[in-house]
Amino acid sequence: MVDKSAAQKKIDELQEQYSKTKYNKATNKYLGELRAKIAKIKHAIESTSRKAGTGYSVRKTGNATVVFVGFPNAGKSSLLKALTGVDSKVADYAFTTLDVIPGMLEYNGAKIQMLDLPGLIQGAHIGKGGSMKIISVVRIADLILFVVDINTYGNLYQLIDELNMLNIRVNRRKPKMRLEITKSGGVNVEANGHLVPKKDVVAGVLNEFKIFNGEVIFYENVTEDMLIDFVADNCVYMRGVVALNKIDTVGATVVDAITKEIEAKTGMTVMPISAKMFSNIPELKKDVFESLDLIRVYLKPKEGNPDMEKPLVLDKNSTVIDVVKKINTKLVKDARFAYVTGPSSKFANQRVGVEHIVKDGDIVTIIFD
Ligand SMILES: Nc1nc2c(ncn2[C@@H]2O[C@H](COP(=O)(O)OP(=O)(O)OP(=O)(O)O)[C@@H](O)[C@H]2O)c(=O)[nH]1
Ligand SMILES: [Mg+2]
């Protein structure tokens, strides 16, 4: 267990040292170590908090799970109703919702589980407002739907920071790099022409995690923070979409400007909506579906027409075998090959192996023994 306020104090001290130290060749390694030290304490706070939270009992169902994250009173429960028809209590005061309320959105043949959650507040990363229970649900989701009241949209940046401090990286992915631990030879860096931290900084970070010999290979530009995340190996990387709510309360030019600002600052798709007036709800469903990277595959019997009504919904990059699993896992051992017509085939009825990767809109006939 970690004393959170003492740990926070230590972080503040280290951060002060960090900002006071001028960046140059001589201080490079020292700065790397400071950053890694800060990251380690943050991770300790985070894992203590995670253990402390008892968690809600939610079970993932459907093809994908979306969680609603927002400050209290932003309109999460109103949005759940607009998207799924489920009545989650709505009221004009903060902390109306105190539990996880599930709803199901059916879209393009996919069943998308939507979880309305209590609001998150500033200080969530040190456990304020029962946040650890909320965060444990956020971690299991496939997508975060940020619900933001346009009148207080600056809260969104705070939420992203809070999640960041809880090791949830929004709209980022794991850096493309590799670490091979060796027995001797110190720390070596293969930058492959990319913009990466200097060798002594990399060594400083690795040493902080008790790694003294290793080969670090970069396949893209990587910052020092990304390097620390990679070595610590305890972050989740999650996609996000923003529902900019209550646009009925402000003018169109304001909506436009704020939408653009959030998109530019966060890189997320932003959909201006009004849960109350039902504006842009179909458009939001589309954005959510597209951000989940789901694909639809239509089954066709050997003789006969494909079933275009009920697609099978799968994750992107699924193979023919995944399609078979979705039909019935018992059939997997008997599947031999398939005929595919659609975006993943070169021509109609192309014969493909079971490892073939299917794409959205494919029509597939599976041949069994
Ligand atoms: N004008 C306007 N009001 C809205 C809109 N959506 C929600 N509200 C109002 O905002 C208040 C809060 O809505 P809720 O849906 O309860 O918000 P919540 O985010 O679930 O709140 P907590 O559960 O307390 O975190 C209610 O009075 C809603 O009627 C909207 O699009 N426009
Ligand atoms: Mg609510």
Image (cartoon, rainbow, N blue to C red):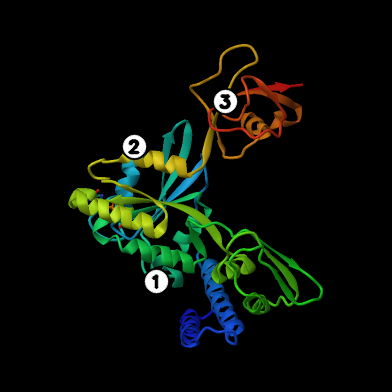
Work out whether 198 lies above or below 268: below
Q: Secondary structure at mark 2?
A: helix
Q: Is mark 3 within 8 Å of ligand 1?
A: no
Residue 246 or 19: which is nearer the viewer? 19
Question: Which quadrant of the figure contains the N terminus?
Answer: bottom right
Work out whether 22 lies above or below 232: below
Give the mark, 1 or 3, whose residue is nearer the N terminus. Answer: 1
Disc ID at residue 305: none
Q: Amino acid at mark 3?
A: Gly
Q: Position of residue 57 (x, y in %)?
A: 50, 53
Residue 190 or 60: which is nearer the viewer? 190
Residue count near mark 1 (Cα–Cα under 10 Å), binned few <14, some 14–19, many ≥20: some
Say if residue 1 shows up in the picture.
Answer: no
Q: Amino acid at mark 2?
A: Pro
On the image, numbered disc 2 is attached to which residue? 282
Residue count near mark 3 (Cα–Cα under 10 Å), binned few <14, some 14–19, many ≥20: some
Between the residue at mark 2 and the residue at mark 1, the CA separation in whole angstroms equals: 34 Å
Q: Report the residue at 22% width, 54% height from top.
A: 254
Q: Are marks 2 and 1 in contact (CB under 8 Å)?
A: no
Question: Which quadrant of the figure contains the C terminus?
Answer: top right
Q: Amino acid at mark 1?
A: Gly
Q: Report the residue at 66% width, 66% height from top.
A: 191
Disc ID at residue 342: 3
Residue 83 quadrant: top left
Q: Residue furthest right?
A: 183
Residue 356 or 321: which is nearer the viewer? 356
Give the mark, 3 or 2, whose residue is nearer the N terminus. Answer: 2
On the image, numbered disc 1 is attached to which residue? 123
Residue 216 or 100: which is nearer the viewer? 216
Q: Secondary structure at mark 3?
A: loop
Q: Report the residue at 48% width, 82% height from top.
A: 15
